[in-house]
């Protein structure tokens, strides 16, 4: 189970985002096995920048906002399932 | 920008020109780059080159991994003017870095990020000049011998060792000046090129940095990543702007539905662009879309206006000829005659059609390799008894098709095998799925034919669906043998 705070993603959102990643990328791993704090990029789940753009696209469709790279590091939002979910919780529309 | 024009009379010939300038810009205030909203002039660029050239280590070879396009360009120019050679590998896996170190033992990394991730000695890109601290006198624009070796670019080859290809200054210049003409880049009305591809990749190297240098144009120092970043880059760039991108980036850009500022030119390369996407690009971005065809070995050799024709038109001086059933490219700026990795149907001496790729060659998101190379990397991993990569039949509408690998490795977990593969091959080629089998159904000659691979993959996908249904139905788990 995951710790939640008012400003961060709850367990339901974590699971929803994990499901979204698995279906967008047609991954073999079950959504429930994606570790919330393991890296999505490179080591860990092993996503690359092509995957990240695919996930960004479905995130924008599902949650109604476009991802932006706020700094030099395009992939910081994708450092883990939790960081992506927190970012979605903070920016989602509706 | 002008319409696609004829070559100017002063087009250089390697037989008559001994030196060629670093850039075609001459006005000290000419714009070389736009960086974080700031304009970087020729005067400032030349001063930055001198600063970086003076701090480069005492080595002949530089691996320039700077992600800021302006840093990369300054590092490249500083290396060139100080007689150093840049190395442009197709990937930075530990295995590739080991090969680079063997190829050029003195090689050092020039980086504007974390140097620690490389197994080679690294130097940090220095602070640049501020606009208000430039020397009063502008240094002269460097002139470089046309025979000067500027870079080694590498392809993965088929033997497990990256293959180096030489790039000399004169031939690079001839190539990108022809590109500038083909793209209609008009030095009298300098464009700003916005690239979604890295400058280290041959396409980005030529089409965002060198072509700007030699066509009086500027480039944006960034590399917008998300669709909204690309939209923002287009919106903040003064006209005329050009978007230098790939089919994959165009598809995600249009799929997301962000509002887009019109540009004057769109350029696509790395994979053939579906004609529907070409039409969409012209409509959404309000500009002609030109596709470039080329390879690491040859540089660029042809262009086409994809919404209007499927025929490619060769760059001046390039010849195609058929030898032993394969098409070779030669002439013009090409260093040595090269067999092309695509099946090419010539229409006449100037025009051709692409009819698919040769079976062994792989191109994923602009990264190229061969099945032979990938198989060798897989089989070299301790614990792998047998294995093979496969490129599935797939859709080609701007989506990226991933490779599949079959492997016999009884003592290895998927996690261990993936970690070992990641050391050796670019992430673009990481198999998805990686399918473990007890044995591979090789044929009498020891081969694993395409049809066999496709059948293995389909069987795997059927098992996966069946497993999912069983799980969903809370059924028995006796057959739940995943891979």
Image: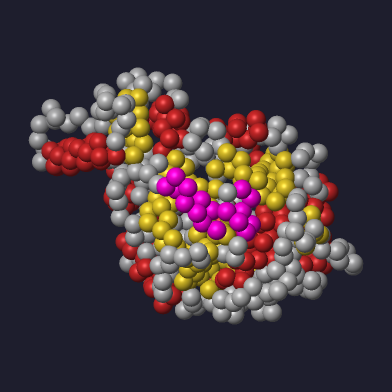
Asked whether B407 falls inside the magenta stretch, the response is no
Q: Is residue A25 left or right of residue A42?
A: left
Q: Position of residue B459 (x, y in %)?
A: 19, 37
Residue placed at 75% from the left, 59% from the top?
B15
The image shows residue B13, relative to residue B2, as above or below, that is above
Residue depicted at x 35% and y 24%:
B386
Residue B168 in the image: state x and y as whole percent. 70, 51
Q: State the image quarter where residue B18 is shown.
A: bottom right
For residue B404, which quarter of the picture? top left
Residue sitting at the far right: B137
List x then y, in percent, for residue B241. 58, 74
Left or right placement of residue B171 versus residue B368 in this view:
right
Residue in view at x 62 percent, y 44 percent: B165
Q: Which residues are magenta?
A: B319-336
Q: Is residue A91 above or below residue B181?
A: above
Q: Nearer the viewer, residue B88 or B312?
A: B312
Residue B271 visible in rendering: yes
By secondary structure, the bulk of the magenta-drawn segment is best described as: strand
Q: Quadrant of the N terminus of chain B?
A: bottom right
**Left or right of B242 in this view: B168:** right
């Amino acid at each position: 189970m995951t710790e939640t705070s008012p400003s961060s993603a709850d367990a339901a959102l974590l699971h929803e985002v994990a499901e979204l990643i698995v279906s967008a990328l047609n991954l073999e791993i079950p959504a429930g096995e994606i570790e919330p704090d393991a890296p999505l990029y490179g080591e860990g789940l092993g996503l690359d920048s092509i995957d990240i753009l695919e996930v960004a696209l479905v995130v924008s469709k599902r949650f109604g906002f476009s991802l932006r790279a706020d700094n030099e590091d395009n992939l910081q939002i994708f450092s883990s399932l939790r960081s992506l979910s927190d970012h979605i919780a903070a920016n989602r529309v509706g | 920008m002008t319409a696609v024009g004829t070559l100017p009379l002063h087009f250089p010939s390697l037989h008559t020109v001994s030196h060629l300038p670093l850039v075609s810009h001459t006005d000290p205030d000419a714009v070389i780059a736009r960086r974080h909203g700031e304009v970087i002039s020729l005067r400032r660029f030349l001063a930055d080159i001198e600063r970086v050239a003076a701090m480069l280590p005492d080595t002949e070879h530089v691996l320039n991994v700077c992600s800021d396009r302006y840093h990369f360009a300054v590092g490249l120019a500083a290396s060139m003017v100080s007689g150093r050679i840049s190395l442009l590998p197709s990937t930075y896996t530990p295995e590739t870095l080991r090969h680079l170190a063997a190829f050029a033992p003195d090689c050092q990394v020039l980086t504007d990020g974390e140097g620690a991730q490389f197994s080679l000695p690294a130097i940090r890109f220095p602070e640049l000049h501020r606009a208000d601290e430039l020397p009063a006198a502008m240094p002269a624009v460097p002139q470089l011998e046309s025979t000067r070796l500027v870079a080694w670019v590498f392809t993965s080859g088929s033997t497990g060792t990256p293959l180096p290809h030489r790039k000399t200054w004169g031939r690079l210049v001839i190539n990108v000046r022809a590109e500038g003409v083909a793209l209609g880049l008009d030095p009298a009305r300098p464009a700003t090129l916005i690239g979604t591809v890295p400058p280290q990749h041959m396409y980005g190297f030529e089409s965002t940095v060198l072509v700007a240098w030699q066509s009086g144009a500027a480039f944006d120092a960034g590399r917008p990543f998300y669709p909204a970043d690309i939209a923002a880059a287009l919106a903040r760039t003064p006209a005329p702007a050009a978007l230098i991108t790939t089919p994959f980036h165009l598809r995600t850009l249009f799929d997301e539905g962000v509002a887009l500022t019109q540009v004057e030119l769109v350029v696509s390369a790395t994979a053939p662009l579906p004609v529907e996407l070409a039409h969409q690009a012209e409509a959404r971005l309000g500009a002609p879309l030109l596709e470039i065809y080329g390879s690491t070995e040859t540089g660029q050799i042809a262009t086409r206006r994809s919404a209007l024709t499927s025929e490619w038109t060769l760059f001046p001086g390039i010849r195609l000829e058929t030898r032993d059933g394969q098409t070779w490219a030669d002439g013009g700026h090409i260093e040595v005659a090269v067999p092309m990795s695509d099946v090419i149907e010539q229409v006449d001496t100037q025009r051709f059609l692409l009819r698919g790729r040769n079976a062994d060659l792989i191109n994923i998101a602009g990264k190229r390799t061969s099945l032979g190379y990938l198989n060798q990397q897989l089989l070299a991993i301790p614990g792998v008894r047998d294995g093979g990569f496969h490129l599935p039949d797939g859709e080609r509408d701007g989506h990226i098709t991933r490779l599949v690998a079959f492997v016999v490795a009884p003592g290895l977990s998927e996690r261990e095998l993936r970690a070992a593969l990641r050391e050796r091959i670019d992430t673009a080629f990481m198999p998805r799925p990686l399918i473990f089998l007890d044995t591979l159904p090789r044929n009498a000659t020891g081969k694993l034919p395409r049809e066999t691979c496709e059948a293995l993959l389909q069987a795997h996908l059927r098992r996966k669906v069946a497993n999912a249904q069983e799980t969903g139905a809370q059924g028995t788990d006796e057959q739940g043998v995943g891979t």
